[in-house]
Image: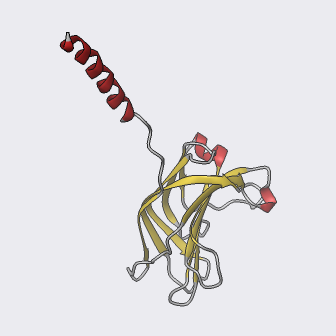
């Protein structure tokens, strides 16, 4: 008789234990990317990865976009910022560089970076010396959704033509935190 009582209790324990492992884990941000200067030195970006969805910019308030930033904008702070038109990356997640466009009609993904060493370089995916591809895979724009970026042999040309380029290679996963 004790065997009969033990067997149902064991089945309930197994069912509860197997159910616990099926819970989805919380998404988390990760950066597995290397950024190098033209002289092959590595650019160090401060910790902090932020992602949000909202208007592309003030001039294009009706164009929904996803924004990802590493570092913090400031007069002497190194950072990079990617902005991608949501409808474009949902249709085709790959943007080939250079990606220049009329400022009133943004398309695809744009990448801008500021490197404060040695004297302050501004690089952009719109420069004609830029090359490579950026893949933006957006799971959604609700808080907690993820966006995965893949930088494949990306070279950004300098907006200050006497300074060198920056190269980006690798992957970034960001978690949407709030509306922009």
The coloring applied to the image is secondary structure
**Which of 3/60 is in front?**
3
In the image, is 81 to the left or to the right of 58?
left
Question: Residue 59: in sight, yes or no?
Answer: yes
**Which of 110/162 is in front?**
110
Could you tell me residue 71's position as x and y percent? Answer: 55, 72
Could you tell me residue 138's position as x and y percent? Answer: 56, 46
**Quadrant holding the N terminus:** top left
The residue sitting at 56% across, 46% down in the picture is 145
Is 176 located above or below residue 164 in the figure?
above
The residue sitting at 50% across, 76% down in the picture is 165
The residue sitting at 48% across, 48% down in the picture is 27
**Which of 86/132 is in front?**
86
Which residue of the protein is positioned furthest toward the front in this rendering?
1
The residue sitting at 61% across, 54% down in the picture is 177
Could you tell me residue 48's position as x and y percent? Answer: 53, 68
Q: Where on the picture, by quarter, is residue 104?
A: bottom right
Is 97 located above or below residue 15 in the figure?
below
**Which of 130/141 is in front?**
141
Q: Where on the picture, by quarter, is residue 110?
A: bottom right
Which residue of the protein is positioned furthest toward the bottom in this rendering?
119
Could you tell me residue 55's position as x and y percent? Answer: 74, 54
In the image, is 69 to the left or to the right of 154?
right
Is 4 located above or below residue 53 in the figure?
above
Question: Residue 66: in sight, yes or no?
Answer: no
**Quadrant holding the C terminus:** bottom right
**Number of numbered discs overlaid on the protein picture:** 0
């Amino acid at each position: 008789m004790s065997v009969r009582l033990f067997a149902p209790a064991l089945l309930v324990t197994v069912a509860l234990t197997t159910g616990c492992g099926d819970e989805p884990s919380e998404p988390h941000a990760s950066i597995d990317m290397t950024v190098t200067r033209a002289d092959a030195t590595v650019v160090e970006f401060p910790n902090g990865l932020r992602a949000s969805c909202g208007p592309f910019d003030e001039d294009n308030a009706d164009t929904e976009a996803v924004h990802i930033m590493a570092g913090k904008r400031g007069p002497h702070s190194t950072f990079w910022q990617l902005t991608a038109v949501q409808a474009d990356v949902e249709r085709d997640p790959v943007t080939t560089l250079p990606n220049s466009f009329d400022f009133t009609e943004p398309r695809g993904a744009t990448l801008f970076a500021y490197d404060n060493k040695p004297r302050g370089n501004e690089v952009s995916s719109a420069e004609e010396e830029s090359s490579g591809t950026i893949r933006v895979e957006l799971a959604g724009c609700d808080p907690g959704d993820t966006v995965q970026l893949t930088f494949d042999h990306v070279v950004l040309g300098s907006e200050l033509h006497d300074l060198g380029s920056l190269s980006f290679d690798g992957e970034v996963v960001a978690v949407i935190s709030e509306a922009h």
